[in-house]
Image: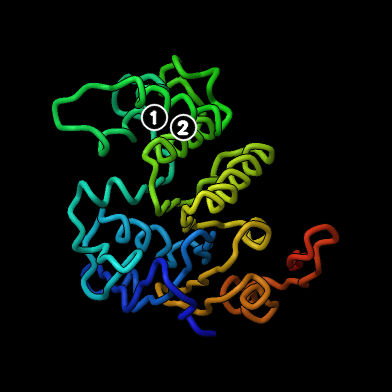
């Protein structure tokens, strides 16, 4: 299956190692602007490392990545922070900060070095919290929230950043079903605003429901790239996850629906 599907995010030969072990091994794929791409694979397949590299949080040993024709890996830090947002897996905050203040961190790339928060920044943060259903907790201390609530705050911070490319590492972790749907519905809606979404997901049925394309990884390498229907086949799921499944058709959406068995 070809990874060449048009302009947008283009990754070629992405490689990163720890000592002699390749965590990310010559990964290549392309995803169009204004789409949702799922990065799939079992634990240890390189999903988180790949996303952190694309966000500039670590430097690849080899390979290239561009977005909209611009080199992501050589982009100035401030420009990248304006254009690319990364939502990592939740961790407990290391200092006391309110939910609203946490979301305001997403506005830092848009203001001068010594400037304080503006009315526009406050409005952007409030709007982002509303979109993730957390507006009523704006003045709560972030540390008092559950893991799932904090995860939604991190998504709101990324929204306040107003990025062109949003990278998310398991954004549905710790969320109950209704919150998972709300977050993924939101990510889906962002594509209508021209945002390109690339998200790691564990749940294959959520990926099948929400992603335009998926990149399936195993052992740090790409196994397949394509639409959910092309990639989430019984053969590939068995090969990568060592589980059996039957691929049905969702009665409402027509998308793949995986029924697993031992």
| Residue in the image at 60% along x and 61% along y | 211
Task: For marks 1 and 2, give the one nearer the viewer.
Answer: 1
Between 121 and 152, the one nearer to me in the picture: 121
Camera-side residue of 65 and 6 = 6
Q: Which residue is drawn at 56% across and 57% down?
A: 202
Helix, strand or loop at mark 2:
helix
Residue farthest toward the right in the current orientation of the protein: 251
Residue 146, position as x, y percentages in the image: 52, 28
Q: Quadrant of the C terminus?
A: bottom right
Q: Classify residue 49 by image quadrant.
A: bottom left
Is the residue 2 above or below the residue 106 in the image? Answer: below
Which residue position is annotated with label 2?
153
Q: Which mark is residue 103?
A: 1
Q: Report which quarter residue 87 is drawn in.
A: top left
Image vertical order of residue 252 relative to residue 178, above or below: below
239 on left or right of 166: right
**Number of other residues with Cα within 10 Å of mark 2, as a class: few under 14, some 14 to 19, many 20 or more:** many
Query: Picture quarter containing residue 14?
Result: bottom left
Disc number for residue 181: none
Disc 1 is placed on an element classified as helix
Which residue is rendered at x = 45% and y = 52% of the image? Answer: 169
In the displayed structure, does residue 145 sit left or right of residue 97? right
């Amino acid at each position: 299956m070809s990874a060449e599907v048009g302009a947008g995010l283009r990754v070629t030969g992405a490689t990163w190692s720890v000592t002699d072990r390749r965590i990310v091994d010559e990964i290549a794929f392309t995803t169009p602007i204004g789409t949702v791409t799922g990065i799939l694979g079992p634990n240890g397949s390189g999903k988180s490392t790949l996303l952190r590299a694309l966000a500039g949080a670590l430097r690849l040993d080899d390979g290239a990545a561009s977005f909209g024709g611009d080199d992501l890996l050589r982009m100035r830090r401030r420009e990248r922070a304006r254009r690319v947002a990364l939502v990592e897996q939740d961790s407990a905050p290391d200092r006391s900060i309110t939910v609203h203040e946490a979301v305001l961190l997403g506005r830092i790339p848009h203001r001068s070095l010594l400037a304080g928060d503006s009315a526009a920044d406050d409005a952007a943060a409030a709007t982002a919290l509303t979109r993730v259903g957390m507006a009523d907790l704006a003045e709560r201390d972030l540390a008092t929230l559950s893991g799932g609530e904090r995860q939604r705050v991190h998504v709101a911070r990324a929204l306040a950043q107003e990025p062109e490319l949003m990278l998310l590492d398991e954004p549905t972790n710790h969320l109950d079903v209704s919150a998972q749907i709300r977050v993924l519905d939101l990510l889906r809606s962002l594509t209508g605003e021209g945002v390109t979404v690339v998200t790691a997901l564990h749940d294959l049925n959520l990926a099948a429901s929400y992603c335009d394309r998926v990149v399936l990884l195993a052992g740090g390498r790409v196994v397949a790239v394509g639409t959910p229907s092309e990639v989430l086949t019984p053969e590939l799921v068995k090969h990568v996850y060592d589980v059996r499944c039957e691929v049905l058709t969702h009665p409402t959406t027509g998308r793949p629906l995986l029924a697993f068995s031992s």
